[in-house]
Image (cartoon, rainbow, N blue to C red):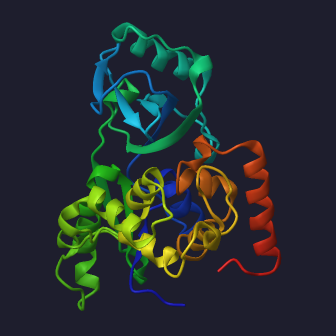
Amino acid sequence: MNARALVNAAGPWVAEVLAGGLGTRSRRAMRLVKGSHIAVPRFYAGEQAYALQHSDRRLVFVIPWQRDFTLIGTTDVPWPGEPAAAAIDDGEVAYLCEVVNRSFQHGITPVDVVWSFAGIRALQDDGASRASAVTRDYALELDTAGGGAPVLSVIGGKITTYRRLAERALETLAPFLPAMRDPWTSRAPLPGGDILNGDVDFLATALRRLWPFLGETEARRLAHAYGTRAARWLEGAVSRADLGEEFGGGMTRREVDYLVREEWARTADDIHWLHSKTGLRATDTDYDRLRDYLAGRLKTGDAA
């Protein structure tokens, strides 16, 4: 197979892709920094979020989340290991509890944590002494040596600037792709985002009108999770029974099938956490039934 250009957007594995797959190396050093969040039962009224300054002068955000919970994060911890193995540690949990307890009358402890998650920031190493001071800017590194297809590596960056980063990446590759169109993503909604006036509450009401068996809370979850694409897998259902078995948190068989077919979900964790947060309300029994159902799909070759 031939390609006119290659983009290495492997995040914390950028250097490994260059070295192992392409036999070259980046001219820039990478610095891996772990960021972790915790979720606790909601402990204040209102929809407002807070930005709290910790004793080390870092900002930590406290955000109303998933109706019944509060999301708190994040941390900045140097990470020397394999990125896929990143997980929150006890010190980070204590750090996040401490900043809340400095600012709110309602105190929290590690026992209150109902869920946590950690991720790795793949940052440019600009020599900053503290992990939190490392630049969040991205760099694009183009390698045209060897006479083959150009290789563009994306180093650093944040999800908040991903669209501009993608446009810059294509601008860099434009000389090698003469048939490329002009930039268009700033004017295009994300999949399911073509909502009238961007009003998600209006969409939730419309979903309830079209599928009256949906509860208000459920319709809001689906509107926020899928936008207009919720109709893709609700179509044809005239009762809740048509959605099939429930696997906890309102996740039904028909929704699971959609996630496997359209969004590459493969595991119970993919479905309950990555693609939704229904895991917050699912039981161990729900997890076991979902794992068994997915295993049956894979066994029969019905993964696509």
Q: Position of residue 26 (x, y in %)?
A: 43, 56
253 or 161: nearer the viewer: 253
- Image quadrant in which the C terminus is located: bottom right
Residue 94 higher or lower than 131, as above or below = above
Residue at 23 percent of width and 66 percent of height: 168
Does residue 125 appear left or right of residue 292 in this picture? left
Residue 296 higher or lower than 125, as above or below = below
Q: Position of residue 259 (x, y in %)?
A: 57, 68
110 or 84: nearer the viewer: 110
Residue at 23 percent of width and 90 percent of height: 178
220 or 177: nearer the viewer: 220
Q: Position of residue 197 (x, y in %)?
A: 17, 65
Q: Position of residue 63 (x, y in %)?
A: 36, 32
Residue 141 higher or lower than 31, as above or below = below
Q: Quadrant of residue 240?
A: bottom right
Does residue 181 appear left or right of residue 166 in this picture? left
Q: Quadrant of residue 152?
A: bottom left
32 or 213: nearer the viewer: 213
Residue at 53 percent of width and 38 percent of height: 118
Q: Quadrant of residue 294?
A: bottom right
Residue at 39 percent of width and 61 percent of height: 223
Number of callouts: 0
Does residue 96 appear left or right of residue 136 in this picture? right
- Image quadrant in which the N terminus is located: bottom right
Does residue 241 appear left or right of residue 179 in this picture? right
